[in-house]
Image (cartoon, rainbow, N blue to C red):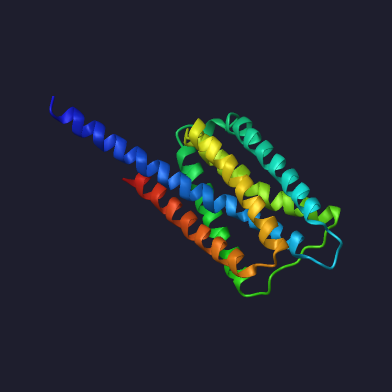
Amino acid sequence: MQKKPTMTAQKTHIEFIYHIAFLFTAIGVSSDNLMIAGISRNKATVLPASKSYVVGALLFLIQITMLYWAKIISGFAPTFMSGRKEWMALFLLYFIAANSIRERRSANNRRAEQIKYTAPNVILLATATASYILAFGLALNWLNRMDNPLNISLRFLIALFLAAGVFLGNKQNDQWLKIIHNVSIVLLVLGVALLLLLTFN
């Protein structure tokens, strides 16, 4: 009888760490939306601040749609994945973290990027940012973690980083963009590392 509170406390502690790990990962994944600063930063094309926020709203809608698609696709996982969904989810998270680090290193070695405001470039930007959200959504569904608090938090973080990217791009504030992006990547790596440790243990 005395062990039950201990087991319950341990379970609560592990669950809390899971939530922190997923929150860190969600911050890192959502920070990819800072790429939108490339459009609002470009002064070579006439792009009022209001229009860049419209592009941000469009990207937000696309990424929210990706979360719904992730839920649908995760339900059609092949039979051979039965019992392996957790490992597939962790592989996706590892892929996101590794690719984000590679992209961040590349970005740190070049000047702040300017993206011309054209339809193909907006489509490419939408695809690039939505791909991480789709992969993260699949991982969350396969880990059975797409609960309401995390779901709401992820949507808030997507909107927050899109707005921050547009605002800092308009202000030409590349220093803060780099700081926020680098901190977010560190949180992403910490989140994925925690999830791997919790799974292996």
Residue sitting at 69 percent across and 43 percent down? 60
- Looking at the image, residue 15 sits to the left or right of residue 23; the answer is left
Residue 165 x/y as whole percent: 66, 57
Q: Residue furthest left?
A: 2
Residue 158 x/y as whole percent: 61, 46
Q: In this view, does 123 lie above or below 140?
A: below
Q: In this view, does 66 lie above or below 180?
A: above
Q: In this view, does 76 lie above or below 21?
A: above
Residue sitting at 35 percent across and 45 percent down? 198
Q: Quadrant of residue 135?
A: top right
Residue 45 x/y as whole percent: 86, 64
**On the rendered image, what quadrant is the N terminus found in?**
top left
Q: Is residue 84 above or below residue 2?
A: below
Residue 128 x/y as whole percent: 69, 53
> How many marks overall?
0
Q: Which of 194 and 82 is in front in this view?
A: 194
Q: In which quarter of the image is residue 39?
A: bottom right
- Looking at the image, residue 136 sits to the left or right of residue 42; the answer is left
Residue sitting at 45 percent across and 33 percent down? 83
Q: Which of 76 and 46 is in front in this view?
A: 46
- Looking at the image, residue 74 sits to the left or right of residue 55; the answer is left
**On the rendered image, what quadrant is the C terminus found in?**
top left
